[in-house]
Image (cartoon, helix red, strand yellow):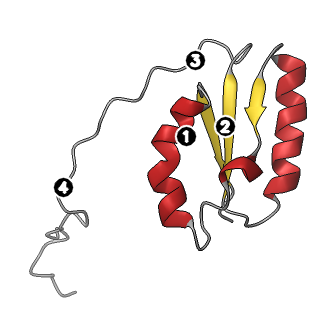
Amino acid sequence: MTTLPNDGYYEVLWPRSPMQVQGKSLAKRLDTLAGKTIVQLWDYVFKGDQVFAALEDSLKEKYPGVNFVHWSVLGNTHGPDERQILADLPRRLKEFKADAVISGMGC
């Protein structure tokens, strides 16, 4: 029987590099969606029109007075006007007094 020179032990390397970006704290979460305004953002991919409609119906049942800014109001977040739509987004969110955003779908 031949004895291996490493005696069964091997040097290993960690496959990940050191983190290059430090994490940030998450924004404070809303206690409830009741009476809040939610902006819908969509990239016009997959079936977002159906998904947003189902989400809206479900959230309206659960949270009285929740309001939605329909995805069609802001436009396609992944289309020919993407750069301008995203550049305008902070101003538009303030304009709508948005409390939350649902962004989808990207499948």
Q: Quarter holding the N terminus? A: bottom left
Give the left or right position of residue 105, taking residue 13 as reference: right
Amino acid type assigned to the residue bearing label 2 in the image: Val
Q: Residues within 10 Å of mark 4 (few under 14, many from 20)?
A: few
User: Which residue is at the far left?
Assistant: 5
Q: CA distance from mark 1 to mark 3?
A: 20 Å
Residue 96 higher or lower than 11, as above or below:
above
Q: Earlier in the sequence, mark 1 or mark 4?
A: 4
Q: Residues within 10 Å of mark 1 (few under 14, many from 20)?
A: some
Residue at point 60% right, 12% down?
A: 31
| Labelled disc at residue 39 | 2
Amino acid type assigned to the residue bearing label 3 in the image: Leu
Badge nearest the viewer, 1 or 4: 1
Q: Quadrant of residue 3?
A: bottom left
Q: Looking at the image, do the residues carrying marks 3 and 4 touch, with CB atoms under 8 Å apart?
A: no
Badge nearest the viewer, 3 or 4: 3
| Labelled disc at residue 92 | 1
Q: Which residue is mark 4?
A: 20
Q: CA distance from mark 1 to mark 4?
A: 32 Å
Q: Residues within 10 Å of mark 2 (few under 14, many from 20)?
A: many
Q: Looking at the image, do the residues carrying marks 2 and 1 touch, with CB atoms under 8 Å apart?
A: yes
